[in-house]
C-alpha cells in the first residue's frame, strides 16, 4: 500500500520507552504499519510482545512516566500524533475507539448499560438525553443484544460475558469512529460466543466501513477475521503482510514458529511444536535481532545488528537477515 492512499491509520516509528536508573528500555521499538479503509489488521505476538502497549500509546491511554514518540500518526491522512492533549481528546473516541480485553473492568458496575452508552453519545455527539436513550437502544440492537429496550436498563453484572463484550463494542461505536482497536476481545469467551463476536466485527466492517486493529495471540482467530497480519516480538515488528501469505509461507522464523505452534486436524495426533526459550523482559533485550537467542537460523550478523524491515514480495515485509523461503536480501528496499 502506498502512503496516504485511502489509509484509515498510518503509524511511523512508534516507540514507547520506560525510563530507569540503568537507562531507558524500549518496550515498543520503531513500530510502523498502515491500515486501509475497511481493512482488518491482526496484531499478533506472545504476551509481552508490546501489542497492547502500542495501541494504548496510539490512544494516549498509557500511565504517566512512559515516554512515547513517533515520526507520524495519521488518521485519514491527518497528523494527530503531535496534537496537544486537549485537541487529541476530541479525536479519541470520535475518530478512533478501543474495545478492551476485560469489559467487566471498563463498564461502570453501578451505572445502567444504556446510560453508559448514552453518556458517550451526549459527550461526543451532543445528543439530548431522550435522543441518546433511543440511540443507545439502537446500538445495542446493532451489536446483537436481545431485547435491547430492556437490556439498556440493566446493569453490567446482569449481562453474560459475551453480552458485556457486545456492550463494550456498542460504547466504542457510539461516537461512530473510523478506526476501532479491539484488544483481545474474545480471549475469555467460549468458542461459540467467540465466533459470534468475530461475525459481529465482520458485519460492522461491512456495514459501516469500519477499519479494525485486532490484537490477539490466536492465529486461528486471525485466519477467520483479518485481511493482513503484523507479527510483533519483544516490541519490534518482525513481519507484516496479507493473511494468506504470512500464514502459509512466513518469512520470519518467529512468525513461522507461531504458525507451527497452532493445532491442526490435518496433522493428526502429533505433539504440538513449541518455540524453545522465553521472550526477553523489557530490561534484558539482547543486542542485534531480539529473536536471535531462540532462533535456529541465527548467525553472527543477527547477534550484532538489528535487521531492518525489508520488502520480501508484493505487500510483504520482514525484519530478518536470513528469511525463510528466500536467500538473504542484503540490498532490498527498506520500509520507512
Image (cartoon, rainbow, N blue to C red):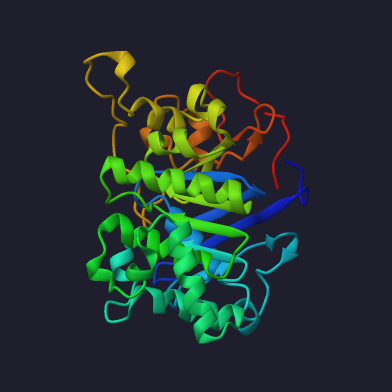
Q: Is residue 18 visible?
A: no
Tell me which residue sits at (44%, 27%) in the image.
256
Image label count: 0
Along the line of sight, the residue nearer the viewer: 251 or 199? 199
Q: Measured from the top left, where is residue 275 in percent x and y? A: 32, 31
Q: Percent x, y for residue 296?
A: 39, 25
Instruction: Give whichever of 201, 25 is nearer the camera.
Output: 201
Residue 282 against residue 294 in the figure, above or below: below
x and y, in percent, of residue 249 in the image: 52, 22
Horizontal side of 70 relative to 239 (left or right) equals right
- Percent across and percent down for residue 133 are 47, 78
Task: Say left or right for 58 vs 279.
Answer: right
Q: Which is more toward the observer, 252 or 37? A: 37
Q: Residue at x 36, y 41 (%)?
A: 195
Is 43 situated above or below 320? Answer: below
The residue closer to the viewer here, 191 or 214, is 191
**Residue 153 appears in view:** yes
Q: Quadrant of the N terminus?
A: top right
Where residue 190 sits, quadrant-wise, is: top left
The residue depicted at 48 percent of the width and 64 percent of the height is 139
184 sits to left or right of 323: left
Amino acid at each position: 500500500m502506498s502512503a496516504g492512499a485511502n489509509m484509515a491509520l498510518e503509524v511511523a516509528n512508534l516507540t514507547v520507552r520506560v525510563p530507569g536508573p540503568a537507562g531507558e528500555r524500549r518496550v515498543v521499538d520503531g513500530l510502523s504499519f498502515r491500515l486501509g479503509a475497511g481493512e482488518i489488521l491482526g496484531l499478533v505476538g506472545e504476551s509481552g510482545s508490546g501489542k497492547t502497549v502500542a495501541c494504548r500509546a496510539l490512544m494516549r491511554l498509557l500511565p504517566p512516566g512512559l515516554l512515547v514518540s513517533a515520526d507520524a500518526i495519521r488518521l485519514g491522512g491527518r497528523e494527530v500524533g503531535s496534537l496537544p492533549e486537549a485537541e487529541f481528546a476530541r479525536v479519541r473516541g470520535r475518530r478512533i475507539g478501543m474495545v478492551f480485553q476485560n469489559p467487566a473492568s471498563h463498564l461502570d458496575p453501578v451505572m445502567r448499560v444504556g446510560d453508559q452508552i448514552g453518556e458517550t453519545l451526549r459527550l461526543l455527539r451532543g445528543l439530548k438525553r431522550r435522543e441518546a436513550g433511543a440511540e443507545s437502544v439502537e446500538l445495542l440492537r446493532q451489536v446483537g443484544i436481545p431485547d435491547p429496550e430492556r437490556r439498556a436498563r440493566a446493569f453490567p453484572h446482569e449481562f453474560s460475558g459475551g453480552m458485556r463484550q457486545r456492550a463494550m463494542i456498542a460504547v466504542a461505536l457510539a461516537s461512530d469512529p473510523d478506526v476501532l482497536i479491539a484488544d483481545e476481545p474474545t480471549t475469555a469467551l467460549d468458542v461459540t460466543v467467540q465466533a459470534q463476536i468475530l461475525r459481529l466485527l465482520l458485519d460492522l466492517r461491512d456495514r459501516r466501513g469500519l477499519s479494525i486493529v485486532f490484537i490477539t495471540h490466536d492465529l486461528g482467530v486471525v485466519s477467520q477475521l483479518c485481511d493482513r497480519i503484523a507479527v510483533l516480538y519483544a516490541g519490534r515488528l518482525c513481519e507484516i503482510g496479507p493473511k494468506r501469505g504470512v500464514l502459509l509461507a512466513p518469512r520470519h522464523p518467529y512468525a513461522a514458529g507461531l504458525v507451527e505452534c497452532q493445532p491442526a486436524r490435518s496433522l493428526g495426533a502429533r505433539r504440538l511444536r513449541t518455540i524453545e526459550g522465553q521472550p526477553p523482559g523489557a530490561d534484558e533485550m539482547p543486542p542485534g535481532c531480539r529473536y536471535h537467542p531462540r532462533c535456529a537460523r541465527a548467525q553472527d550478523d543477527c547477534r550484532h545488528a538489528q535487521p531492518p524491515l525489508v520488502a520480501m514480495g508484493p505487500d510483504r515485509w520482514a525484519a530478518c537477515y536470513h528469511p525463510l523461503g528466500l536467500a538473504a536480501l542484503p540490498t532490498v528496499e527498506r520500509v520507512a
